[in-house]
Image (cartoon, rainbow, N blue to C red):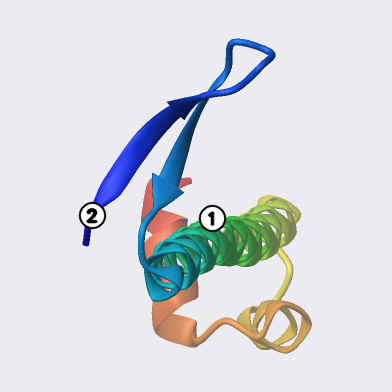
Amino acid sequence: MARTIHKAKDNSLKLIFDEPGEAIEKVTKHLYDRRIQEMFTHIDNYSVQETRREARAEGRTEGRAEGIVEVAKKLMARNRPMDEIVEVTGLSRKEIEKLRVIV
């Protein structure tokens, strides 16, 4: 794998390969390395996007749960019957009883 550095007319340095196959091997390796790097970048970007999606979904779920709890608290404050609170909120009697202690 002999190589020679050649100074061109424009004073740039060029690497000259003595064997034609060497240049192809070098270019192929460079392209392969670049492709691997692009794949990892794509995987990283996908991971970030997936994490954001999961965080948003989790936030929406928590927000809905907090909203349901607020509705239950308001119904309790208005002295609505337990059966009505269960029906409107979808919470169990036990969950509502726990809220009653907090309120």
Q: Nearer the viewer, residue 93 or 15?
A: 15
Q: Nearer the viewer, residue 12 or 36?
A: 12
Q: Which residue is mark 1?
A: 48
Residue 30 screen position, x and y as percent: 45, 59
- Disc 1 versus disc 2: nearer the observer: 2
Residue at x-position 59% and y-position 22%: 8
Residue 47 screen position, x and y as percent: 50, 64
Residue 101 screen position, x and y as percent: 37, 54
Amino acid marked by disc 1: Val
Residue at x-position 50% and y-position 59%: 34
Q: Which residue is mark 2?
A: 2
Alpha carbon distance from label 1 to label 2? 45 Å
Q: Is residue 97 left or right of residue 3?
A: right
How many marks are shown on the rendered structure?
Answer: 2
Residue 2 screen position, x and y as percent: 23, 54
Above/below status of 96 relative to 48: below
Q: Residue furthest top?
A: 11
Give the secondary structure at mark 2. Answer: loop
Amino acid marked by disc 2: Ala
